[in-house]
């Protein structure tokens, strides 16, 4: 539980709100590749080819569900590779944890400005995040602050802070009620703590589509979650690696890694703010398992996929305009 795990299509109105106005088959599985590249329309066909080429070059085992949005918002499948296999989610399931906490906020059981205590005992001393760097405990933070750290810098201590207000069994019950019985955290003896658990590529993909469709959470909670996943400090080493700052803002993403696993799931938006592509990608068994940086084979493969996926789903004539557009992100020099 001390490593990164994660998550988070819909109408133009919802997109505008958040945009701001089988088995362990390897990537070389030829039947999967044929399904993704030979019988689909142009955008899905290209996305499938990009995925299979990059994943095959990286080696190891890949499982994924990737779709491109049709004009009516329905999902056109581009990749279905072990989509129903249960996988270790790692920090991708932090999105699912956030969904459970925000569901309680939507029901009036919690408030984002409600505080929780960051005690020395609750801090995970290694791994990812910022709370372990504070060096001064106890302190207090809001639930909103804990969720922001959970979804952006993938703070491991934030997992425990979320568990204080939404125990493991309640998280799982909420996710089952929302239609995700295979996306579950793993309870431990302490009811307020858990390992990040498992999911399937299909469920993570469908959870993200429900999120942007506005059917998973309230509009306010949807906007909060997607703003975090699209922020400049959200994970940049995989899908968003080879993108400009403006392009990165078009991608809501959450990655997770532990041992040999390298996972990432998210949504790409058009320049008009509408969702265009949803991906849930889970890989393991590649070389260099102790390398958690962007040069790891699977992470590098996702960087290749990300740049080309975005080009594929960017509407004609929009790429040049995007490159000239002023990004909503502005660095600060203090003051």
Image (spheres, rainbow, N blue to C red):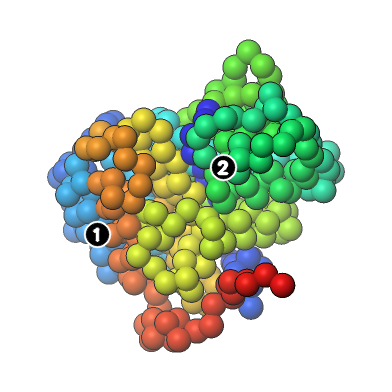
Front residue of 226/279: it is 226
Q: Local crowd at mark 1 within 10 Å, few (<14), some, or many (≥20)?
A: many
Visible residue check, residue 2: yes
Q: Local crowd at mark 2 within 10 Å, few (<14), some, or many (≥20)?
A: many
The label shown at residue 129 is: 2
Mark 2 or 1 closer to N-term? 1
Residue appearing at x 68%, y 56% in the figure: 224
**Is residue 157 placed above or below 322 in the rendered structure?**
above
Residue appearing at x 69%, y 43% in the figure: 146
- Circle count: 2
Quadrant where the C terminus lies? bottom right
Numbered disc in front, either 2 or 1: 2
Which residue lies under the disc numbered 1? 50
**Is residue 184 placed above or below 106 in the rendered structure?**
above
**Is residue 57 placed above or below 47 in the rendered structure?**
above
Front residue of 121/75: it is 121
In percent of width and height, residue 122 lies at: 67, 27
Q: Give the alpha-carbon distance from disc 2 to disc 1, as whole Å.
A: 32 Å
Residue appearing at x 45%, y 46% in the figure: 255
Front residue of 134/215: it is 134
Visible residue check, residue 5: no
């Amino acid at each position: 539980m001390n490593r990164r795990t994660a998550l988070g299509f819909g109408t133009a109105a919802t997109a505008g709100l958040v945009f701001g106005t089988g088995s362990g088959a390897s990537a070389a599985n030829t039947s999967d590749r044929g399904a993704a590249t030979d019988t689909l329309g142009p955008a899905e066909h290209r996305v499938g080819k990009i995925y299979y080429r990059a994943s095959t070059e990286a080696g190891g085992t890949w499982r994924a569900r990737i779709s491109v949005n049709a004009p009516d918002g329905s999902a056109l499948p581009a990749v279905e590779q072990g989509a129903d296999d249960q996988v270790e989610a790692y920090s991708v399931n932090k999105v699912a944890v956030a969904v459970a906490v925000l569901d309680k906020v939507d029901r009036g059981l919690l408030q984002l400005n409600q505080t929780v205590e960051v005690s020395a005992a609750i801090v995970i001393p290694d791994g990812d995040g910022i709370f372990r760097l504070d060096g001064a405990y106890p302190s207090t933070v809001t639930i909103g602050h804990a969720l922001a750290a959970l979804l952006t810098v993938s703070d491991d201590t934030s997992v425990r802070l979320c568990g204080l207000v939404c125990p493991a069994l309640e998280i799982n019950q909420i996710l089952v009620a929302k239609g995700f019985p295979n996306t579950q955290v793993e309870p431990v003896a302490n009811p307020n703590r858990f390992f990040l658990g498992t999911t399937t590529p299909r469920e993570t993909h469908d959870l993200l589509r429900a999120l942007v469709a506005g059917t998973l959470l309230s509009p306010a909670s949807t906007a909060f979650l997607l703003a975090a996943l699209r922020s400049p400090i959200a994970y940049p080493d995989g899908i968003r690696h080879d993108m400009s700052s403006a392009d990165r803002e078009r991608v809501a993403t959450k990655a997770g890694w532990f041992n040999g696993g390298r996972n990432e799931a998210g949504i790409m938006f058009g320049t008009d703010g509408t969702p265009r592509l949803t991906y849930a990608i889970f890989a393991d068994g590649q070389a260099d398992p102790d390398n958690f940086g962007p040069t790891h084979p699977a992470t590098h493969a996702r960087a290749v996929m990300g740049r080309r996926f975005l080009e594929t789903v960017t509407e004609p004539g929009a790429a040049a305009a995007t490159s000239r557009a002023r990004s909503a992100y502005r660095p600060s020099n203090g003051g």
